[in-house]
Amino acid sequence: MEDDFKHLVRISRKDVDGNKTIEQALTEIKGVGISLSITMCRTLDLDSEAQIGYIADEDVLKIEEILENPQKFNIPNWMLNRREDYETGENIHLIESDLDMTLRDDLNRMKKTRSYKGRRHEAGLPVRGQRTKSTFRNSSSVGVKRS
């Protein structure tokens, strides 16, 4: 059984550590949280506590297929990270670089339209209503340098 163990498993453009459990290894993929990871294990009838290094190649392909199109496998819409997309209006789930690019495009759109959130992002101030009287004074943190 040691011969089948893979120290690195490639899942959706990401190398994950083969010594981790399937549940924890899937959370290394940007855009996949613990609840989605557990749901994917239950959907595929995988033991979430097993090491991902022992997983079969067919199961890796099934995991990638779920990450591509979770609605096909009856993953609920509230688990998706891009509900009612701005451009398409569809419920989709993005991972890795696709997620980064979409978030960057959203910020740029807010800045371009000069929305309140966009102006706060431009100024480097808090966006979600936090107080600024005592925090967010300067962008660098203040500490004591030990010699």
Image (cartoon, rainbow, N blue to C red):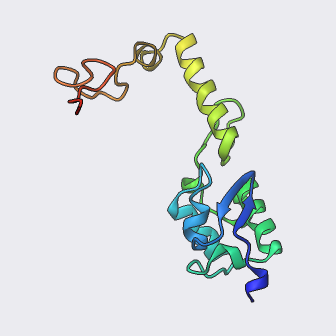
Q: Quadrant of the N terminus?
A: bottom right
Residue that extends furthest to the front in the rendered view of this protein: 147
Residue 12: percent from the left, percent from the top?
74, 54
Instruction: Name the quadrant containing residue 52.
Output: bottom right
Q: At x 78% / y 61%, what residue is drawn?
A: 65
Relative to residue 26, is residue 146 drawn left or right? left
Residue 142: percent from the left, percent from the top?
24, 25
Query: Viewer-proximal residue, 105 or 97?
Result: 97
Q: How many marks?
A: 0
Instruction: Name the quadrant containing residue 19.
Output: bottom right
Query: Viewer-proximal residue, 98 or 92?
Result: 98
Q: Is residue 112 visible?
A: yes
Q: Vertically, is 100 above or below 23?
A: above
Residue 76: percent from the left, percent from the top?
60, 60
Query: Viewer-proximal residue, 1 or 139?
Result: 1
Residue that extends furthest to the bottom in the rendered view of this protein: 1
Residue 136: percent from the left, percent from the top?
27, 22
Instruction: Name the quadrant containing residue 50.
Output: bottom right
Relative to residue 83, is residue 70 drawn left or right? right
Q: At x 70% / y 58%, what residue is drawn?
A: 71
Q: Vertically, is 102 above or below 3?
A: above
Q: At x 66% / y 48%, what residue is drawn?
A: 93
Q: At x 23% / y 32%, what residue is drawn?
A: 147
Q: Vertically, is 81 above or below 145?
A: below
